[in-house]
Image (tube, rainbow, N blue to C red):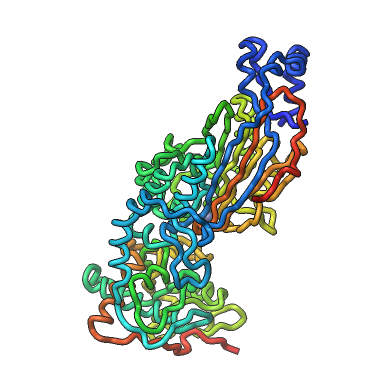
Amino acid sequence: MRIYRFGIAIPLLLAFLACTTYRIEKSETANIRLDSLVTAPSSASVEAIIKPYRDKVNADMTEVLCISSEAMYGGRPESPLTNYCADLTLEEANRFCTAKHPEIKMDVSMINRGGLRIPLPKGEIKTMTMFELMPFENEIVFLKLKGEVMLEFINHLAARGGEGVGGLRFGIKENKAIQPEIGGKPLDTTRSYWLVTSDYIANGGDGSEILSKSSERIDTGIKARDMFIQYFKRMGKEGKTVTAKTDGRIYDAK
Amino acid sequence: MQNRRTFIRSLGAGTLGAFVLNSPMQAFAKSELIQLTILHTNDFHSHIDPFPKDAPRNAGEGGMAKRAAMIDQIRKEQKNVLVFDAGDIFQGTPYFNYYKGELELKLMTEMGYDAAAIGNHDLDNGLEGLDAQLKNAGFPFINSNYDFTETILEGKILPYKIFKKQGITIGVYGLGIELDGLVSKANYGKTKYLDPLEQALRMEKFLREEKKTDLIVCLSHLGYAYKEDKISDVKIAAETFHTDLVIGGHTHTFLKKPELITNKSGQQVLVNQVGFGGLILGRIDYFFEKEGKKHTRNNDNLSIK
Ligand SMILES: [Zn+2]
């Protein structure tokens, strides 16, 4: 016998209150697919609420930013997608520095492979594409790192099998980075470098806790996606076609 | 923790026992059952519109207007309906990026949702982001294991809520997943994560023994089940004494039908989760009988429509 509860205060509170005690006799369940087999029409009141929101979003989302000559896929240790996104991040970050922080220049960019959610399609790149590529609300962060901290970070990227990087070249041997080069020159542990990445990575995401050892940090407040949209829009305006390449910036060193 | 039987015994009172067995209420007890219909979603992730016509999967399915129509239809047929969501309302389509959850919550309000749990993605715009949207929710968020004391959400999230339908009382508590490592620290701030099982045991004891609720529902965003030793919807069901139903989320698990789990009192508990994206509406109907008649709960009656 399954008794769900007793009316405890009953002896004092009159029997009538005991009426408020119930017990499950049985249960039935059904998980209903909301597909075309559902005969219920759409709710007009809900449709009416959605419409103005949808119209605004659709108008923005379908805007064509630029044209890509080929599809770009992500992968490790490097890939057209991760290279391209990291390179544009470095370029846009330095454009921002020139305007707002002329005293500094970004040396390295890092965009995590896992944060790029779809391959970029061949053909039209729309605002919608950018939302699909980067659905999360990550913001761009600048970090100043001592040479040895940068080296440790690069070793972490090597241990992950490679990530999206710009301004940086290294080999991976036994899960460690070898011959790291920044801006075409061997990494110098006696100096500092600037890294541009997302707040997700800067805050230790994907195991990058080492970045808590940065000596300076600038939170730009710029959403990574907005930066990408701005970049692709400019590509379109300038009539440039998006093309992808791999260049051996991260390689397996045997 | 006492089980139900010792609870009854500790109240003790031969008088109470005798009262129950020979209750004059039996004279009032009617044979008809009272039906309570619980509808639920989880992880609908800002899928306001149906999946696009060219989507590789689920093309044209889901959408809140269709869900609303389905709920309306059920309300026409049923007197006692409760609608819950188990979290991750936010994030997944541009609607969220543009309007920060405003539309999701307005529509859920229009649809008459009764409560929602907090999912990790509901904190994607930080505690401030959720706080700013609460004004659009005509229903409470329920969570029992996030301590928001030192945050902007203090006093704005309910630890539990009791609903009453045709005399039946339904106690609802909510559980959220560990935030560290899943949500950026900047987004959860000074929120303290408390052990979900401990809080579940505390809440269910309170809801049954002090609040005397007839049905106890846990809205969980812990995830259905894990290979590793991690707290989950299924574990909550198995490790508690009084919780009757766990409505889960987070792992986007598509269950064809709810799972039956045996709890610490040796009773069968339902655990359900309906995937993600608002593709499915979960439905559980309970048939209650007034206490006093001897009836065995028959789980064979559990059928899938
Ligand atoms: Zn989740």
Q: What x and y, as percent, mark residue A180?
A: 47, 82
From what the image shows, is residue B256 above or below residue A22? below
The quarter of the displayed image where residue A159 is located: bottom right
From what the image shows, is residue B78 above or below residue B21? below
Q: Residue at x 29, y 77 (%)?
A: A65
Residue B265 relative to residue A159: left or right: right
Q: What x and y, as percent, mark residue B45?
A: 46, 57
Closer-to-camera residue (A55/B186)? A55
Q: What x and y, as percent, mark residue B299?
A: 74, 42
Residue sitting at the far left: A99
The quarter of the displayed image where residue B237 is located: top right
Q: Residue at x 59, y 41 (%)?
A: B218
Q: Quadrant of the C terminus of chain A?
A: bottom right
From what the image shows, is residue B228 above or below residue A105? above
Closer-to-camera residue (B141/A225)? B141
Q: Residue at x 51, y 72 (%)?
A: B56
